Amino acid sequence: MLTTTDSVQLKSLRVLHINKFHYLKGGSERSYFGTADVLIRHGHNAIFFSMSHHDNLPCSTSDYFMPDVDLNSNDRNPINQLKIALRVLYSFESKRRLSRLLDGCPVDIAHLHNIHHQISPSILHELKRRKIPIVMTLHDYKMVCASYSLLANERPCEVCCEKKYLKAVSRRCVKNSYTKSILAAIEMYLHHKLLDIYDTVDTFISPSLFLKNKLEEMGFKKQIIHLPNFVKNFENGEERIDERNRKGISVVYFGRLSREKGLLTLLKAVKLLQDNNTVAIKVNIIGEGPLKDILKKTVEREKIHDVQFLGYMKNEALYREIKRSMVVILPSEWYENNPISVLESFALGKPVIGTKIGGIPELVKNGITGLIFEPGNARDLAEKIKYALNNPEKMVTMGETARSFAEQELNAEKYYQGLMKIYRSVIEKHR
């Protein structure tokens, strides 16, 4: 348990980790599990609170988890819809379940990740009642945007700045639905204006400077500390580019297949290169998502050659495909935060061709750890791919620089020391 001297010294903390998904669904879950893992390896204890799901990893506190709910269900039963709406707005059930968990598992500090909708920030009132210090890692723009992403009509959008959430309704920002957008706007007004519920959080953690600055610029006045995500060390010995076998070199995208990721721009760029017969290129697209069928149909209709959809991959199978590529491409057209895909590419010694948007340029330094292009600009992306394929030796050098950057600046120990500094500060504040 917690021990103190003149300044707070933290040993064997009992840390409550809260996230709405308890399986590796995306980047926020990697952060959620990764944070718990690095703390456990330093002698701290982990207690989890999340939502039940058939893909969940084993957990000793799963009996306390919230029941699974599908917010995208087509169930039109008005009673069921009302139950979901009330859960999104303020879940008394979340508070009760968390309270029972804490009765049996007292904790020293709570570390929150994504809690919106499936769990709801109602749990913050229970944590405050028990005087538990709270930190929260930010993974998106939910603190200022009803739809998380600062996107409307597939373009970056900031019209809800300074708490003007009704604009989300007129733009149907949430799933292009008036009903869901109205519910999201009500949720934002309730949590941020009426209850000011996030005032209970002692410190927010932002993995990117861009996210921190954007939230502050849009009127979010809480304390935010910049602490980048970390990436684990990978084995050395990734495959090198063979100068004698440049023909047919591959590039790879891995992540969610959704419109804001810019994958249609990637296909346009590949089509431009193939039509001009400038370079031979193979493209491997790894992942699943709502845009997959559209992407496949685009490849067929436009007769784009050598594009493979490899589906969802993880761990060694994924790393093997990344190692086989010359470069990773992240063509995002939304304000990415601190993308795990870039960190993992760097750790594997691969440079990244990424867009000049969000937190990507904080990691991808043009000509140093990769190449930068304008979001949505297929011609610019085509030029960057062409450069990479025509300069394999430079891409190897960029990959080595990217690996060194990850090892020195994005390692688990540096993250742990930064996190403990934050923990120490909020625990001292509560004393």
Image (spheres, rainbow, N blue to C red):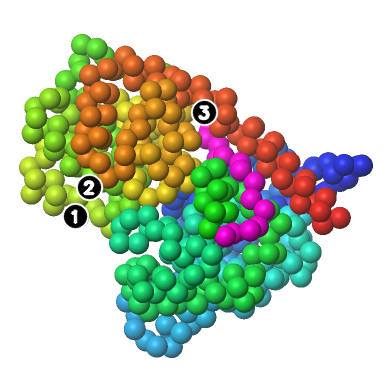
Q: Give the numbered dot on residue 406.
A: 3
Question: Residue flagged by tag 2: what amino acid is it?
Answer: Leu
Tag on residue 264?
A: 2
Which comes before the other along the chain, label 2 or label 3? 2
If the image is split into quadrants, where does the C terminus sit? bottom right
- Label 3 secondary element: helix
How far across and down, in percent of the image, does residue 338 sit? 49, 42
> Which element type, helix, strand or loop, lies under badge 1?
helix
Which segment is the magenta one? 219-232
Q: CA distance from mark 1 to mark 2?
A: 9 Å
Please say if 346 is above or below 108.
Answer: above
Q: Is residue 228 magenta?
A: yes
Mark 2 Cα-neighbour bin, 10 Å: few <14, some 14–19, many ≥20: many
> Vertically, is 232 above or below 151?
above
Give how far across and how far down residue 242 sits, in percent.
26, 14
Single out the mark in the foreground, 2 or 3: 2
Neighbour tally class for label 1: few under 14, some 14-19, many 20 plus, Cα within 10 Å: some
